Amino acid sequence: MKAINYYLIVDDIKEKQKKIAGLIFTEKTDVDNRYIKARIISCGDKVEGIEKSDIVFYDKHAGHGIDYKDKLYKVIKISDVVLVE
């Protein structure tokens, strides 16, 4: 599987649940966190500054899912990335 143009294929990294004042916040209840942490699986040929295996943060409302070999990945545009770790 190879991304083309300005697209990236990412694999979301599950964050540990947060505990605040005894309450457990899951991904669905953590409304303060707008960004998702992910590992780059493939970069399009026009993407600069990001390489395979980099860790990035991107807008959680961006992109769409793609099922490949029984695993769900996300396809996002380079403009959706806000931070490279």
Image: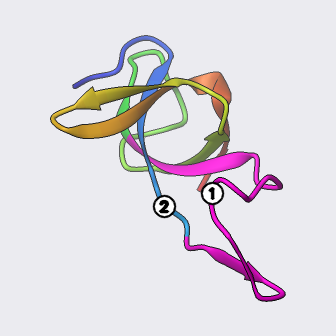
| Viewer-proximal residue among 4 and 59 | 59
Residue 14, percent across and down?
A: 48, 61
- Looking at the image, is mark 2 or mark 1 earlier in the sequence? 2
Residue ranking furthest to the top: 5
| Viewer-proximal residue among 9 and 50 | 9
**Label 2 amino acid?**
Lys
- Label ID, residue 27: 1
- The alpha-carbon separation of the residues under discs 2 and 1 comes to 9 Å
Secondary element type, mark 2:
loop
Horizontal side, residue 81 vs residue 76: left or right: right
The answer to whether residue 6 is above or below residue 73 is: above
The residue that appears at 68% across and 76% down in the rendered structure is: 18
- Quarter holding the N terminus is top left
**Residue 26 within the magenta-colored segment of the rendering:** yes
- Label ID, residue 14: 2
- Quarter holding the C terminus is bottom right
Residue ranking furthest to the left: 69
Residue 45, percent across and down?
A: 38, 17
| Viewer-proximal residue among 39 and 17 | 17
* Residue span colored magenta: 16-40
The residue that appears at 55% across and 24% down in the rendered structure is: 63
The residue that appears at 55% across and 66% down in the rendered structure is: 15
Q: How is the image coloured?
A: rainbow
**Label 1 amino acid?**
Glu
The residue that appears at 47% across and 20% down in the rendered structure is: 7
The answer to whether residue 64 is above or below residue 38 is: above
Tags 2 and 1 touching, CB below 8 Å = yes
Q: Nearer the viewer, mark 2 or mark 1?
A: 1
For the image shown, how many numbered marks are present on the structure? 2
**Residue 49 within the magenta-colored segment of the rendering:** no
Residue 77, percent across and down?
A: 56, 21
- Label ID, residue 42: none
